[in-house]
Image (tube, rainbow, N blue to C red):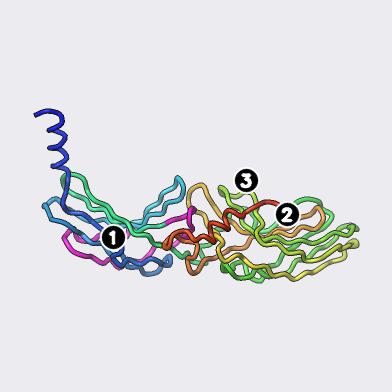
Amino acid sequence: MGLRDKIKSGMRAMWSPITVWMADQGSDQLVTAGGPAKVVIDVRGEDDGTAERVEVFLKMTAFDHIQKWPLGEVPAVLGQHTLEVTMPTGLAPSCAGFAEYTFNAELHRSKGVGSSAASVVDVVSRPEDTYWPSTPRSGQEGDDAARITIELDSPLVNAGAPVSGRVTIHALRPIDPASVDLALGPSIGPPPQTDAKFSGVARVRLAHDVALGTAQPLVLPFAVQVPAAAPPTLYNGGKVSVVWAVRVEFGRTTGWALVGVLDPTGAAGVRNQPSPSLLSFLASLDTSGPGR
């Protein structure tokens, strides 16, 4: 037998008429971390006696980082099989390009090559699992002529909703007239965010040409909208985190406070393909203006 015949013979021995299929079989497309989920696998073809088991798992893909969570098994017999599972907790929220999830099934055989299939699913994370970097959640940069304190009405806010609170500025010495500018936006980069650049996507001027005397306080309320297509706060377990902050600039002093952005509807996910609004949002990120 020649080499070509041996290769063909080996391919026939490895090929299996039994496969797994998941697309459009009815698996849930939107789930919540820690909540119930339905995964449907169709075992198709002809049973050749080599099928042993079908492993089911959740997979997250993010750039060069992949992570898997076992969900269970279904019988390696022909027909459609439904697996009711409880989703793992601590999952990062789905976000196109940053954290993309699939339900996966892998058919294991006693001989030859197995079969695998996948179904796209978007994950809504739990508020209590919101990622916070291992650094302070508020602080100040620049000139020490003033102290800027940012008080948020809530540390968590949904995408598309306003972040609100109060800014208090205490002058430690007389300050010449200057505007008070606020910027809201994410820092996208490796944790713990020390090298990530802030990108202001929503900006508002809170006051014009303010002059403060020593120990004279200034209190300014604010409300600024998080864009509806914004990527939520997340850490994907690899090299990328998205952390939102409010930054207030007064003269050469900048105060900041972190805010967690949630995506309760999974709008930033991929089950309907990456939304044009999300892609436009990511393309619009810049570091110009207040709080850069």
Amino acid type shown at disc 1: Met
Judging by the rendered image, the residue that carries numbered circle 1 is 22
| Relative side of 81 to 99, left or right | left
Spot occupied by residue 241 in the image (x, y as percentages of width and height)? 54, 52
Q: Earlier in the sequence, mark 3 or mark 1?
A: 1
Spot occupied by residue 124 in the image (x, y as percentages of width and height)? 46, 65
Image quarter of residue 181: bottom right
Spot occupied by residue 145 in the image (x, y as percentages of width and height)? 84, 55
Name the element at disc 3: loop
At a point 63% along the width and 47% down the height, the residue shown is 194
Nearer the viewer's eye, disc 2 or disc 3?
A: 2
Judging by the rendered image, the residue that carries numbered circle 2 is 289
Label 3, residues with CA under 10 Å away: few <14, some 14-19, many ≥20: few
Spot occupied by residue 279 in the image (x, y as percentages of width and height)? 53, 56
Magenta-drawn segment: 71-100
Q: Earlier in the sequence, mark 1 or mark 2?
A: 1
Q: Alpha carbon of mark 3 to alpha carbon of mark 1: how far?
A: 41 Å
Q: Contact (CB < 8 A) between labels 1 and 2?
A: no
Q: Contact (CB < 8 A) between labels 2 and 3?
A: no
Label 1, residues with CA under 10 Å away: few <14, some 14-19, many ≥20: many
Up the image or down, 235 lies above or below 206; here it is above
Judging by the rendered image, the residue that carries numbered circle 3 is 195
Amino acid type shown at disc 3: Asp
In which quadrant of the rendered image does the N terminus lie?
top left
Q: Alpha carbon of mark 1 to alpha carbon of mark 2: how far?
A: 48 Å
Q: Is residue 238 magenta-colored?
A: no
At a point 78% along the width and 69% down the height, the residue shown is 220
At a point 17% along the width and 43% down the height, the residue shown is 14
Nearer the viewer's eye, disc 3 or disc 1?
A: 1
The disc placed on residue 34 is none
Q: Nearer the viewer, residue 15 or 272?
A: 272
Name the element at disc 2: loop
